Image (spheres, rainbow, N blue to C red):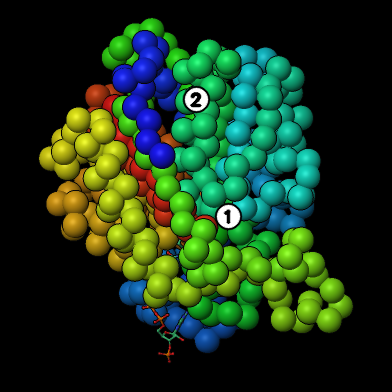
Amino acid sequence: MQSNDKSRHSCTCSIIGTGSYVPVRVMTNDDMSKIVDTSDEWITSRTGIKERRIAAADEATSDLASNAARKAMEAAGVTAEDIDLIIVATVTPDMFFPSTACFVQKKLGATNAVCFDISAACSGFLYALTVARQFLNSGARKTALIIGAEKLSSLINWTDRNTCVLFGDGAGAVVMRCSDAENAPGRVLSAVMGSDGNLADLLKVPGGASSCPITPENVESRPNTIHMEGRETFKHAVTRMCHAADQALTMAGKTAKDIDMVIPHQANARIISAIADRLGVPEEKTFMNLQKYGNTSAATIPVALDEAHRSGRIKRGDVLLMVAFGGGFTWASTVMVW
Ligand code: COA
């Protein structure tokens, strides 16, 4: 699925504010090595991750999301009443239903918003951004709050060293609006999305839902935790992300040389290096913060975007390439001018 604002619409969708929030508790690789047979050396060399954040027991995904959202709204200069669309991308909702977006609405007091969640795993934020653009471009909604938020610690099997070292908790948010100004800052130039459900089994949480409810008989085998074929996932991630990035660049009328910063999904430093390499983008133009947070799924890109903006790593007018890959499999890429 591909879309390009310029081909069909006169208005321009722009991100007008960003925010992020990570829980206070830090869990280092050395802490991990006390739980499973692993080491700081293995985790750092295979993934680039040094530490991750773990939410408190009484902190739900909607709490992380609301904290990030408040910062994005403050940066955008909008009130809760201004927000008329809330989309939360998450695979760790507070509950099966209501949606996490509805809980966020309640916590923010955004009474004018229509609210729903998107499930596209680590591609969720870019999926949500694209869905929100359709609402804004069509004129159906005016001010969208788009959030990627995860409490992945609630899905981790803490006895599986293959997966437990990889993930963390966090949330990032953006406020998006349409404007008539063709050169509005934060404008989205292009977006591509894709999915391949044939590969669903390579990365999943198999239990706890309708196909495999938790029972006294299966609870010991922890079906309600992340199961992943790491090597296969790695290969598909690199291929799909490179292809999606190429498509998004072409659609935006840009080449790799035009990119000022790649803001990729933060799963593994080796995946990010491979993508930068294949695209021909130098490492210094590739944003990486996974050493601090691990893989926070739908939250990685909005957290990275917020950090890149607030730290001054990106400035107005920069061309940004965002690219993601996740369970499903799903993938997505967006080119924008900051
Ligand atoms: N500590 C120490 N050893 C570990 C370990 C850990 N935390 N996790 C796995 N190992 C071991 C394995 O048991 C295996 O041992 P063996 O050879 O004795 O069987 C060995 O390390 C190599 O395992 P392998 O899975 O082949 O490692 P890898 O180089 O593929 O790295 C991942 C593993 C998970 C880091 C890597 O495959 C990866 O990043 N995959 C993609 C993950 C991802 O991006 N997921 C989300 C997509 S959105």
Left or right: 140 as drawn, with respect to 324: right
Residue sitting at x 54%, y 49% = 120
Residue sitting at x 16%, y 38% = 255
Query: Label for residue 169?
Result: 1
Q: Secondary structure at mark 1?
A: strand
Cβ atoms under marks 2 and 1 closer than 8 Å: no
Whether 65 is drawn above or below 167: the answer is: above
Q: In the image, ligand 1 is in what quadrant?
A: bottom left
In this rendered view, identify the residue nearer to me: 37 or 11: 11
Residue 80: horizontal and vertical position, in percent?
Answer: 66, 19
Query: Label for residue 21?
Result: none
> For mark 1, does the 10 Å Cα neighbourhood hold few (<14), some (14 to 19), or many (20 or more) residues?
many
Query: Label for residue 134?
Result: 2
Q: CA distance from mark 2 to mark 1?
A: 29 Å
Instruction: Give the amino acid at mark 2.
Output: Gln
In this rendered view, identify the residue nearer to me: 310 or 128: 128
Residue 199: horizontal and vertical position, in percent?
Answer: 48, 65
The tag earlier along the polypeptide, 2 or 1, is 2
In this rendered view, identify the residue nearer to me: 185 or 332: 332
